[in-house]
Amino acid sequence: MSDLAQTLAQFGQEHLLQFASQLTPAELTSLESQIEAIDFEQLAALTSGKDKTIDWAELARRADPPRAVRLNRPAEESPSEAAIKAGTEAIKAGKVGVILVAGGQGTRLGFDQPKGMFKIGPVSNRTLFEMHCDRLRGVMDRMDVEIPMYVMTSPATDTQTRAYFDANDNCGLPNELLHIFCQGTMPAVDDSAGKILLADVNQIATSPDGHGGLVAALHKQGCFDDAQSRGVEYFFYAQVDNPLAQLCDPELIGHHILAKSQMTTQVVSKRFPMEKVGNVVTIDGKTNIIEYSDLPEDAANQTQPDGSLKFWAGNIAIHVFDRTFLESVVDDAAGLPFHRAHKAVTFVGPDGKTCKPEKPNAIKFERFVFDLLPLAENAIVVEGDPSRVFAPVKNADGAAVDTPAKCKEAILALHHGWLEAAGAKIAPGVSVEIHPLWASCANEVAEKVDSGQEFPTDTFLS
Ligand code: UTP
């Protein structure tokens, strides 16, 4: 105890033991082990701003566009057919696994359960988890192969996520293909003095350590070994809050394989210079992401000779990784920079009372998975059509963008487009949603729908 108190005093964090005299021996032991798990030197560097700071403005001024496979490229350049063939062969050979990250706290959405349990199917009312699992089942069915899915949770979402999959028959996935694994945490500190917050008298306030905690968690929880034993060579990575992510898209996987890339990122073309997405760029021959908040306006406004934006590639957080690449960066990933997020965190004050702030009061520290990009050999970006691959659920309805309502609109626009291309007539105001086991693209819809077929009422084609 005295050693611990000394360490705390050294780092100005003595308040963590301020309620020690009121705790039972078991509670005190638990608090001590939480304190022992904290890397105080690392935290001190982070709170004092003495960790690695990167001059993004300077880097942005000498950055170039990334090595890319564009949507409107000459036919002979990175042909789609060759990529689809390579990707399909890899999937059918059982070389692809899926990583779905679902450890975030979803604070902006304001939903008090794991975001994956949020209902988003416009007609079906399926949850985000169901949407992803159904899509994966569709791929397995068409390709006649088993594909493991590794779902990353955090202490904030783990118990409820496991209970949800248990209660819902694993959303149709065979038990042996579903791996739920939990990521690590970082302490949250108050935004004025950098003091670690207590969530309760015997509980440190922690938050998930960001999707960049993925590599350490995959390693620690034995997922690499499991993937290797199944012959998985590539991971298809997606985030739980984008139900349009085309899990195991053969073309994306194929471009990754043909380019011998260790980490491939699907991007969309930015609509305007300061759009709030990460900008994928090349700096000194390495691929990097510059956050929109770090990109100076003059750099963002730069154009190419044809007048298009120089920094056009917006990150949508869909990646393909070589398994061996992720395994090889376990140590490097432990040194990835932390990013700071200013958030509202509930805490216990010196009077022992719980305080739920309305405004951000705390700093959370998160690592980002895309910071692995500069470590990857031959990294490329592949442009996707946002209407087919990107409809994130970030904010509660009422916000301007990335809301559940906008996401449902995007799902319906895609499905209605397929139906109307096949000649179907959808009555005004009617919603038709398509289950991926029924059809997963315009061609499959065309095989099932007759020209002139009418949809007078809301329908879920499943
Ligand atoms: P976001 O950065 O959008 O965070 O996560 P969030 O938790 O969903 O939402 P806010 O910022 O609190 O409103 C993008 C994706 O990364 C996952 C999330 O679950 C989401 O799929 N994520 C985020 C993790 O798995 N772990 C984390 O520590 C953070």
Image: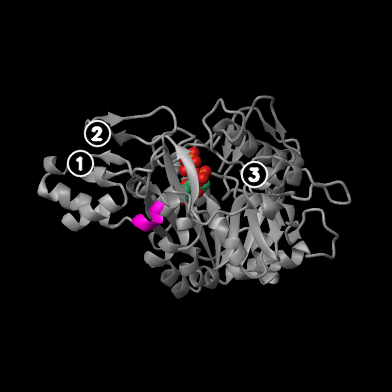
- How far apart marks 1 and 2 lie (CA) works out to 8 Å
Q: Amino acid at mark 2?
A: Pro
**Sequence-wise first label, 1 or 2:** 1
Mark 3 Cβ inside 8 Å of ligand 1: no
* Residue at the spot 69% in from the left edge and 43% down from the top edge: 387
Q: Is residue 118 left or right of residue 14?
A: right
Crowd rating for badge 2 (residues with CA inside 10 Å; few <14, some 14–19, many 20+)? few
Q: SS of the residue at dot 1?
A: loop
Read off the residue under disc 2: 350
Q: Position of residue 193 (x, y in %)?
A: 38, 40
Residue occupying the point 42% across, 67% down: 219
Camera-side residue of 50 and 328? 50
Whole-Å distance between the Cαs marked 3 and 2? 38 Å
Q: Which residues are magenta?
A: 39-44
Residue at the disc numbered 1? 18
Kind of element beneath mark 3: helix
Residue type indicated by callout 3: Tyr
